[in-house]
Image (cartoon, coloured by chain):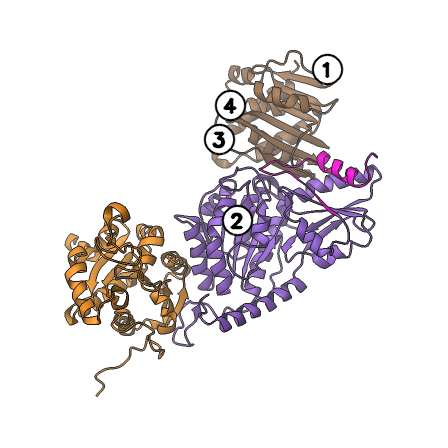
Amino acid sequence: MIVFDKPKALTDTPFHYCPGCTHGIVHRLVAEVIDEMGIEGNTVGVAPVGCSVFAYNYFNCDVIQAPHGRAPAVATGVKRAHPDDFVFTYQGDGDLAAIGTAETVHSAARGENITIIFINNAIYGMTGGQMAPTTLPGQVTTTSPYGRKPEIQGNPVRICEMLSTLEGTAFAQRVAVDSVKNVKAAKAAIRKAFEVQKNKQGFSIVEVLSTCPTNWGLSPLKAIEWLRENMIPYYPLGVYKDKTEEAKVNE
Amino acid sequence: MSNILLAGFGGQGILFAGKQLVLAGMKQGKEVSWLPSYGPEMRGGTCNCSVIIEDEPIGSPLVIKPDILLAFNGPSYEKFAPNIVTGGKLFVDSSLVNFEGARDDIEIYPIPATTLANDNGLTGLANVIMLGYIVKKTGIFDAEYFENSLISGIPASKAHMIDFNKKALKLGFEYEG
Amino acid sequence: MGEKLLMKGNEVLGEAAIRAGCKLFFGYPITPQTELAEYLAKKMPKVGGLCLQAESEVAAINMVLGAASAGERVFTSSSSPGVSLKSEGISYIVGSDVPCVIVNVQRGGPGLGGIQPAQSDYYQATKALGHGDMHFIVLAPAYVQEIATLMGEAFDLADIYRMPVMILADGALGQMMEPVDFGEKKQREIPEKTWACNGHKNQRAHNVVNSLYISPEVLEEVVVERFKRYAEIEEKEVLFDEYMTEDADVVVVSYGITARIAKTAVKAAREKGIKAGLFRPISLWPFPKKELASLADKAKCFLSVEMNMGQMVDDIKVAIDCKKPVSHYGRTGGVIPTPDEILAKIVELNGGEN
């Protein structure tokens, strides 16, 4: 009996991610959903710039590597060219919430029928621990060495809350991958987002609170604790928008 | 060969009038070009277009020294009349332009196009009256041919404008100073 | 010969693209090319296509990257400041080896510059529209009719060589109307897009469209391979036009709208007994080096005429190996040169009074 197997939608290439990094978990969750829905053959992924830039090496579906922050625009181009393909982007917080804010907001506003997997770990990983748009007040990074001071470096951006105000956003949920229970919930959210896309209901986003032990300077376990104690209070988990539920209520 | 410059206020139908000349030339197999001024003054500002109708392929589409100038307002007259070639023709809306002391080395054809339009229930068609006048005075096109060319370009949704345009052209054709 | 239509250059850009089988346009409004997007906004839905106004030039070029990666014919258009914004995406498109067409209806610069016609993006288009070791094909139409022809050709070239092709026009050409006959363009043989990211349907390995090569050796290899393609293009795809150059003492070199103004000046010079000729590069990259070099033995001098401060001069010097003097006459900032100004320069180069 097989009790554990690699999803078909993942290649055999070993992940390059640091020990304790949660990218691997989220990649796997996305791949499992693709497998379960049987959609690998008509899915196109869009990889960002950041730690997950190499996502094209890991997913077995077709993948386009986008310029920094532009993944939702690239995904728009693919989706408009092939409306029946599943198109998802996989982006970090610097990519999605800083340099690519305009592309994120406007693809949501247009109700682009794409799915965004948004990894929020409150830091720039690939470039080595700089302040991200989602870095918490007081959080130390290499470019906020005295802790992020809102009066100097401004306040963090809450993406799900912001996007849920837009008419084109059909589904927005924030999840975390800090426990088995939450990982299961994260997978359910990703599945839901792809279903929303399948039903052509509009823009869907799953924000995943993730860890970056290396750049946080914590062990993987301590990092999980830090996420729980600091990130979840600032970025509450939950469903921020669900047009499918609204539709049910209205029926 | 004709280098024509049409100039006036935005909204006077300058670009439309230029296009009618070019269309009529094109249908006769001539080489033609139409180049508008463009800019932030979409309405009410100054507006002009260069029209060239030639037998040979057209080089520069920009009319700097017009053979024919159609001046629909004072500023256009003042700006462009000095550039008309010697022996060239100035058509001017005399209801709007004071052209006293104009050059004596050009032919001047004044017509109170705006007044004629208003007096005949053709407000907004001073440009077409002017077209009728220049076609007749220059002989650049046969009058009947030009009328057919212009009318055939009016879309079905604006069929009610056909008679107004015919009337305006006729006023221009028949105007005798 | 088909029917002649009177159309604006900007509209012809759109119509010719549709006739080339392009059903996708992503753009952002900017003077003096907006009529193109307006034309497509009306026309695309009627032919089952899409004209989408993006939130920025940056987004528009990346939508192009997406649609091109998915294997579809796609194009975008802008004017100078907007093209600068697109430069990031263009570099990625080159690095990803995907085809698309990019239109630049130039206006004066730098900065917000002006909105009148210019050719001051010659350097940007031919030398450095994006970071990295790169080229792409740049075609400069001079007539509204030629826009129609070159636009069709641009899509074919893009598909054949898997790279962006730029149509480098200017505000005057975009705004002016001339008769155009779309005729029937014979489409070239287009290779199948086996690399496209359009879903592998469980019938092939996954495709990746990517411009990242973390190993320097691998990246070098990819770039070198791409330059072999560039060499092939320089060999096969040069486009130019000549007028009375066979016996010319003064060879005027000029492209786009300026070339036709220069042609008027060359005619006038001939009437004065001056042996002037016009060489008009149509492909600015690949630049017609050999063809220009072949004129260098006979000609006394070359005159570059452009609506800029002399951006093509060095290309001419390199092409003719500096065998003869190369001068420049140009206006910039949106001023269109007159035939008389160019004629005066030709007379001067020919040794003064005639």
Look at the picture and state if C120 lies above or below C198: above
| Residue count near mark 3 (Cα–Cα under 10 Å), binned few <14, some 14–19, many ≥20 | few
The type of residue carrying mark 2 is Gly
Among the two numbered marks 3 and 4 on one chain, the one whose residue lies closer to the N terminus: 3
Disc 4 to disc 1: CB gap under 8 Å = no
Residue C14's disc number: 2
The magenta segment = C326-354
In the rendered picture, chain C carries what hue? Answer: purple
- Dot 1: element: loop
Q: Chain of mark 2?
A: C
Q: Report, in whole angstroms, how far the alpha carbon at label 4 lies from the one at label 1.
A: 31 Å
Query: Quick one: C212 or B135, which is closer to the camera?
Result: C212
Residue at which label 3 appears? B42
Query: Element at badge 3?
Result: loop
Mark 3 → mark 1, Cα distance in angstroms? 34 Å
First in sequence, mark 3 or 1: give its number: 3
Disc 3 chain ID: B
**Residue C69 or residue B177, whichever sits in front:** C69
Report which colour depicts chain B: brown
